Image: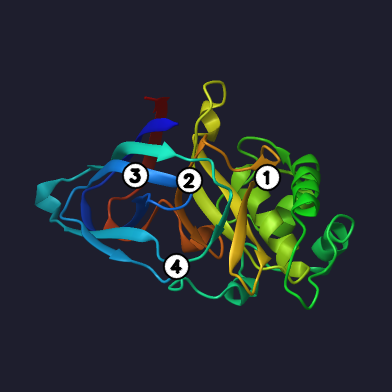
Amino acid sequence: MKLHVKHTTDYRYSEPLLYALQTLWLTPQSGPAQTVDFWSLGAPEKLFPQHDAYGNSIHSYTFVGKVTDDVRWSLVNAAGQVDTLGVAEFVDAPSVPHPSFFLRPTHLAAPHAVLAEFGRRFVAPAASNGKADLASLLALSQAIADVVRYQKNSTNVSTTALQAFQAGAGVCQDQAHVMVAVCRSLGLPARYVSGYFYAANEPDLASHAWADVCIDVAQRRWVSIDITHSCLIDQRHVRLAMGTDYDACPPIKGVRQGGGEESMTVSITIEPV
C-alpha cells in the first residue's frame, strides 16, 4: 500500500523566542517493512542530518533570535510517500545494538515483579536458547490491550509502563511501553517503535506506537507487534524510529530560551495513493 503522510507541528509562544535547539525523529527509512518513495522536512532553520545510536535518521536545527525580532511562532513540517510492505518479522542490521542491549531497564519501560507475574500467564520466561514463541507474544499483546484499555487523554508522555498498567488505561504509547516492560521482565529483549497508522475511521491513531520483540537472539530476529490492535504490523503501518522507550525516539525533542508559555498543535493526515 502506498501512503502519503503529512505531519505538521505548529508552535506558538506568548513571548519572543530567543533560542531553540530541536532534534527531529521524523524521517522514515526504507527497510524490510517499507520503501520510502520520497520524504521532505521543513523547519525554521537549516537542518543537519545524522543517525543516532539505534540507526534512526534524525535532523537537528538551532534557532537564535532577539527580543526585537518578536518571533512567537514556528513550524515543523514532514511529508512524503511510503510504500508499506506488511513485513512483520525481520533481522537487524549488524550496526544496530545487540538484542541484549534492549533488556536494560529504562524509566518509562522498566521491568517489575508485578509485570513479570502478569506476563508469565502468557509467555514463559526466556529460555537459554534465547527464542520466543510468536503465538504466545500475540496472546500477551491481546491481554495487555484488554488490561490497559485505550483511553484518550488518560496519560502523558512521562507516564511509566507500571503506572499505565496499574491505572488500567492509556494510549498506544502506554500499551507499547507495557509490552516492552513485560517482555524485559521475562528476559525477552524488546523496544519501543514510533510511527504512523492509516485507518480512515481512527484518525486519533495516525501518530502511533508499537513494540519490537526479539524472537531469536542468536539470529537477531525481531517481530513487530501492534498492541493497540493486537496484531502484527501490516501495510497500515509506517515505521519512523525505534529505541529503548519513547524518550529515546520522540517525534521532536528540544530545549528553548524565552518564548514564555508554549502551545503546540499537531496535525497528521495519511491518505492512500
Q: Quadrant of residue 151?
A: top right
Instruction: Quadrant for the C terminus, please.
Output: top left
Residue 12 in sight from this viewpoint? no
Gap in Å between the C-alphas at discs 3 and 4? 19 Å
Query: Is residue 15 rendered to the left or right of residue 228?
Result: left
Gap in Å between the C-alphas at discs 2 and 3? 13 Å
Residue furthest out toward the front: 219
Query: Is residue 34 rendered to the left or right of residue 20?
Result: right
Q: Which mark is residue 195?
A: 2
Gap in Å between the C-alphas at discs 4 and 2? 15 Å
Gap in Å between the C-alphas at discs 1 and 2? 13 Å
Circle 3: residue type? Val
Circle 2: residue type? Gly
Residues at marks 4 and 2 touching, judged by CB atoms closer than 8 Å: no
Question: Which mark sits nearer the N-terminus, 3 or 4?
Answer: 3
The residue sitting at 48% across, 45% down in the picture is 195
Instruction: Quadrant for the N terminus, please.
Output: top left
Q: Which residue is mark 3?
A: 36
Image position, residue 88 (x, y; %): 58, 48
Image position, residue 152 (x, y; %): 62, 35
Out of 145 and 101, give the one closest to the viewer. 101
Circle 1: residue type? Ile
Q: Which residue is mark 4?
A: 54
* Whether residue 4 is situated above or below residue 144 in the rendered picture: above
Q: Secondary structure at mark 2?
A: strand
Gap in Å between the C-alphas at discs 1 and 4? 22 Å
Q: Secondary structure at mark 1?
A: loop
Q: Residues within 10 Å of mark 1 (few under 14, many from 20)?
A: many
Image position, residue 197 (x, y; %): 51, 36
Circle 4: residue type? Tyr
Q: Which residue is mark 1?
A: 227
Name the front one of labels 3 and 1. Answer: 3
